[in-house]
Amino acid sequence: MNTKSIIVGGAIATIAVAGLVSGVGRSGTGSERILEVPVVNATALSDPSCGCCGNHAAYLGNSGFSVDRQSVQDITATKQEYGIPHELMSCHTTLIESYVVEGHMPSVAIKKLLEEAPDIKGIALPGMPHGSPGMSGRKNETWTVYTIEHDGSSRVFMEL
Protein backbone atom coordinates (compact mmCIF):
# COMPACT_ATOMS: atom_id res chain seq x y z
CA MET A 1 0.00 0.00 0.00
CA ASN A 2 1.31 3.45 -0.92
CA THR A 3 1.57 5.79 2.08
CA LYS A 4 2.65 9.33 2.92
CA SER A 5 3.87 10.48 6.35
CA ILE A 6 3.18 13.76 8.11
CA ILE A 7 3.93 15.11 11.59
CA VAL A 8 0.89 15.58 13.81
CA GLY A 9 1.38 16.88 17.37
CA GLY A 10 4.83 15.32 17.68
CA ALA A 11 3.73 11.98 16.22
CA ILE A 12 4.28 10.58 12.76
CA ALA A 13 1.03 9.87 10.94
CA THR A 14 0.87 7.74 7.83
CA ILE A 15 -1.61 8.49 5.07
CA ALA A 16 -2.84 5.26 3.54
CA VAL A 17 -3.65 5.91 -0.09
CA ALA A 18 -6.72 3.72 0.05
CA GLY A 19 -8.13 5.20 3.24
CA LEU A 20 -7.62 7.76 5.98
CA VAL A 21 -4.68 8.91 8.08
CA SER A 22 -3.87 6.70 11.03
CA GLY A 23 -1.47 7.41 13.87
CA VAL A 24 1.63 5.22 13.74
CA GLY A 25 4.54 6.74 15.66
CA ARG A 26 4.41 8.06 19.22
CA SER A 27 6.60 10.78 20.70
CA GLY A 28 5.62 9.94 24.26
CA THR A 29 4.50 13.51 25.00
CA GLY A 30 0.84 12.66 25.42
CA SER A 31 -0.07 15.18 22.73
CA GLU A 32 -0.47 12.60 20.00
CA ARG A 33 -3.73 12.41 18.13
CA ILE A 34 -5.04 10.69 15.07
CA LEU A 35 -5.72 13.09 12.24
CA GLU A 36 -8.27 11.91 9.73
CA VAL A 37 -7.59 13.34 6.29
CA PRO A 38 -9.42 11.83 3.35
CA VAL A 39 -7.24 10.84 0.42
CA VAL A 40 -8.45 12.34 -2.84
CA ASN A 41 -8.71 9.85 -5.69
CA ALA A 42 -7.93 10.94 -9.24
CA THR A 43 -8.46 9.05 -12.49
CA ALA A 44 -6.06 10.23 -15.20
CA LEU A 45 -7.30 9.51 -18.73
CA SER A 46 -4.73 9.76 -21.52
CA ASP A 47 -3.55 8.43 -24.84
CA PRO A 48 -1.33 5.36 -24.23
CA SER A 49 1.54 6.87 -26.26
CA CYS A 50 1.75 10.13 -24.27
CA GLY A 51 4.75 10.43 -21.94
CA CYS A 52 3.99 13.80 -20.36
CA CYS A 53 0.64 12.50 -19.12
CA GLY A 54 2.46 9.93 -16.99
CA ASN A 55 4.70 12.70 -15.67
CA HIS A 56 1.65 14.70 -14.61
CA ALA A 57 0.09 11.64 -12.95
CA ALA A 58 3.35 11.12 -11.00
CA TYR A 59 3.28 14.81 -9.99
CA LEU A 60 -0.28 14.39 -8.66
CA GLY A 61 0.80 11.29 -6.75
CA ASN A 62 3.66 13.24 -5.18
CA SER A 63 1.16 16.00 -4.30
CA GLY A 64 -0.94 13.66 -2.16
CA PHE A 65 -3.49 12.35 -4.66
CA SER A 66 -4.16 8.67 -5.24
CA VAL A 67 -3.91 8.37 -9.03
CA ASP A 68 -5.39 5.64 -11.23
CA ARG A 69 -4.00 5.95 -14.77
CA GLN A 70 -6.23 4.72 -17.58
CA SER A 71 -5.29 4.57 -21.26
CA VAL A 72 -7.96 5.79 -23.66
CA GLN A 73 -7.72 4.94 -27.35
CA ASP A 74 -9.73 8.00 -28.49
CA ILE A 75 -8.92 10.84 -26.08
CA THR A 76 -10.82 13.37 -28.24
CA ALA A 77 -14.02 11.38 -27.81
CA THR A 78 -13.35 11.25 -24.06
CA LYS A 79 -12.99 15.02 -23.93
CA GLN A 80 -16.26 15.40 -25.85
CA GLU A 81 -17.95 12.97 -23.45
CA TYR A 82 -16.95 15.16 -20.49
CA GLY A 83 -17.93 18.40 -22.27
CA ILE A 84 -14.51 20.00 -22.54
CA PRO A 85 -14.66 22.87 -25.05
CA HIS A 86 -12.14 22.58 -27.89
CA GLU A 87 -10.37 25.82 -26.93
CA LEU A 88 -9.72 24.49 -23.40
CA MET A 89 -8.35 21.08 -24.39
CA SER A 90 -4.95 19.75 -23.44
CA CYS A 91 -3.40 16.32 -23.83
CA HIS A 92 -5.04 14.52 -20.89
CA THR A 93 -8.13 14.66 -18.71
CA THR A 94 -8.29 13.85 -15.00
CA LEU A 95 -11.43 13.09 -13.01
CA ILE A 96 -11.25 14.24 -9.38
CA GLU A 97 -14.30 13.88 -7.18
CA SER A 98 -17.18 15.29 -9.26
CA TYR A 99 -14.89 17.51 -11.36
CA VAL A 100 -13.09 17.30 -14.70
CA VAL A 101 -9.53 18.65 -14.56
CA GLU A 102 -8.08 19.25 -18.02
CA GLY A 103 -4.38 19.45 -18.71
CA HIS A 104 -1.15 19.90 -16.78
CA MET A 105 -2.90 21.43 -13.78
CA PRO A 106 -0.85 22.57 -10.78
CA SER A 107 -2.03 21.01 -7.51
CA VAL A 108 -2.66 24.45 -5.99
CA ALA A 109 -5.47 24.99 -8.53
CA ILE A 110 -6.96 21.55 -7.85
CA LYS A 111 -6.85 22.13 -4.10
CA LYS A 112 -8.55 25.51 -4.56
CA LEU A 113 -11.24 23.82 -6.67
CA LEU A 114 -11.85 21.18 -4.01
CA GLU A 115 -11.86 23.68 -1.13
CA GLU A 116 -14.22 26.15 -2.80
CA ALA A 117 -16.39 23.44 -4.43
CA PRO A 118 -18.00 25.72 -7.04
CA ASP A 119 -20.98 24.51 -9.07
CA ILE A 120 -19.01 23.98 -12.29
CA LYS A 121 -18.05 21.03 -14.47
CA GLY A 122 -14.34 21.52 -13.86
CA ILE A 123 -11.20 23.50 -14.61
CA ALA A 124 -8.77 23.58 -17.51
CA LEU A 125 -5.23 24.71 -18.23
CA PRO A 126 -5.31 24.69 -22.06
CA GLY A 127 -2.44 23.51 -24.20
CA MET A 128 0.81 22.22 -22.77
CA PRO A 129 2.52 25.21 -21.11
CA HIS A 130 6.31 25.03 -20.64
CA GLY A 131 7.26 24.24 -17.07
CA SER A 132 3.77 23.18 -16.02
CA PRO A 133 3.58 19.99 -13.93
CA GLY A 134 4.62 17.10 -16.15
CA MET A 135 6.06 19.31 -18.89
CA SER A 136 9.71 20.09 -19.47
CA GLY A 137 11.23 23.53 -19.52
CA ARG A 138 10.86 26.54 -17.29
CA LYS A 139 7.70 28.49 -16.63
CA ASN A 140 7.96 31.47 -18.97
CA GLU A 141 4.44 32.91 -18.90
CA THR A 142 1.40 33.39 -16.70
CA TRP A 143 -0.83 30.33 -16.72
CA THR A 144 -4.53 31.06 -16.89
CA VAL A 145 -6.76 28.36 -15.43
CA TYR A 146 -10.34 28.49 -16.72
CA THR A 147 -13.58 27.10 -15.39
CA ILE A 148 -15.57 24.68 -17.48
CA GLU A 149 -19.16 25.71 -16.83
CA HIS A 150 -22.10 23.30 -17.14
CA ASP A 151 -23.35 25.20 -20.22
CA GLY A 152 -19.95 24.89 -21.97
CA SER A 153 -18.88 28.46 -21.33
CA SER A 154 -15.77 29.40 -19.37
CA ARG A 155 -14.30 32.17 -17.24
CA VAL A 156 -10.98 32.76 -15.50
CA PHE A 157 -10.68 30.63 -12.36
CA MET A 158 -7.19 31.77 -11.39
CA GLU A 159 -3.84 32.85 -12.79
CA LEU A 160 -0.51 31.37 -11.77
Image: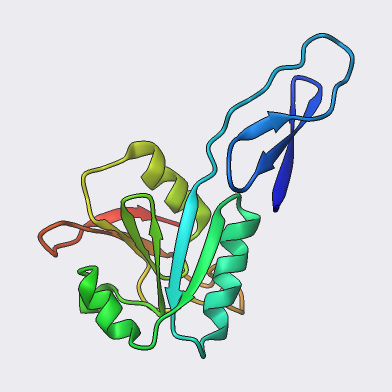
The single residue placed furthest to the right in the displayed view is 28
Q: Identify whether 71 is placed above or below 28.
A: below
The single residue placed furthest to the bottom in the displayed view is 49
Locate residue 51 relative to residue 25 in the image: left or right. Answer: left
Q: Residue 91's spot in the image, x, y percent?
A: 41, 80
Which is nearer the eye, 43 or 110? 43
Residue 134 visible? The answer is: no
Which is nearer the eye, 85 or 100? 100
The colour scheme used to paint the residues is: rainbow
Q: Quadrant of the C terminus?
A: bottom left
Q: Residue at x 55, y 80 (%)?
A: 52
Q: Identify the image quadrant of residue 133.
A: bottom right
Q: Identify whether 49 is placed above or below 18.
A: below
Q: Residue at x 19, y 61 (%)?
A: 154
Q: Residue 90's spot in the image, x, y percent?
A: 37, 77
Q: Identify the image quadrant of residue 122.
A: bottom left
Residue 9 visible? The answer is: yes
Q: Residue 105's spot in the image, x, y percent?
A: 46, 63
Q: Identify the image quadrant of residue 73.
A: bottom left
Q: Residue at x 84, y 28 (%)?
A: 25
Which is nearer the eye, 81 or 51? 81
